[in-house]
């Protein structure tokens, strides 16, 4: 196909303000992804938009397997869906109060803060 660009599991975008570290989650416009490598602000960075990733979690959030999760772009962590948070996927493991990370399957779809 002459119009095909890529499969979309990984996309290249300019790094956000402040730059980004390898493995860090970020919101750019309505895209949520995990950085494949570190990049300075404005430099091209590849973001994985699909897959399962171990991500930082709000310590007070209680998640069950299959629970919808959202990204808090201020705290830079996964939390329960709520105001100002971006829905990004589902938890693939249970993670209770005091747990600081959780495995998440990314949806790979456009997102917007609730």
Image: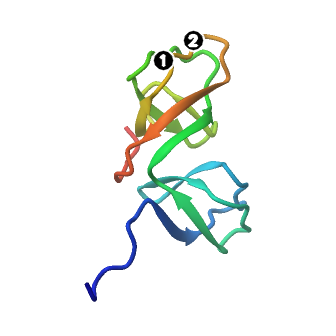
| Left or right for 76, reference 111 | right
Name the residue beneath numbered marker 2. Answer: 96
Label 1: which secondary element:
loop
User: Residue 25: image x %, image y %?
Assistant: 59, 48
Circles 1 and 2: CB distance less than 8 Å? yes
Q: Residue at x 55, y 30 (%)?
A: 103
Q: Residue at x 28, y 85 (%)?
A: 3
Work out which quarter of the rendered image holds the C terminus and state it.
top left
Image vertical order of residue 71 relative to residue 16, above or below: above
User: Residue 106: image x %, image y %?
Assistant: 44, 43
Q: Of 4 and 100, which appears nearest the observer?
A: 4
The image quarter in which residue 1 lies: bottom left
Q: Residue furthest top?
A: 97
| Left or right for 49, reference 22 | left
The image quarter in which residue 107 lies: top left
Name the residue beneath numbered marker 1. Answer: 63
Question: Real-space Cα distance between discs 1 and 2?
Answer: 6 Å
Q: Residue furthest bottom?
A: 2
């Amino acid at each position: 196909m002459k119009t095909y660009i890529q499969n979309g599991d990984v996309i290249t975008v300019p790094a956000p303000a402040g730059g980004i570290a390898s493995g860090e989650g970020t919101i750019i416009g309505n895209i949520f992804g995990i950085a494949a490598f570190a990049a300075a602000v404005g430099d091209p960075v590849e973001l994985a938009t699909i897959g399962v990733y171990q991500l930082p979690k709000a310590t007070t959030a209680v998640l069950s397997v299959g629970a919808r999760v959202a990204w808090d772009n201020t705290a830079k962590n996964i939390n329960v869906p709520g105001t100002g948070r971006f829905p990004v996927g589902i938890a693939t493991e249970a993670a209770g109060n005091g747990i600081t990370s959780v495995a998440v399957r990314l949806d790979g779809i456009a997102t917007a803060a609730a």
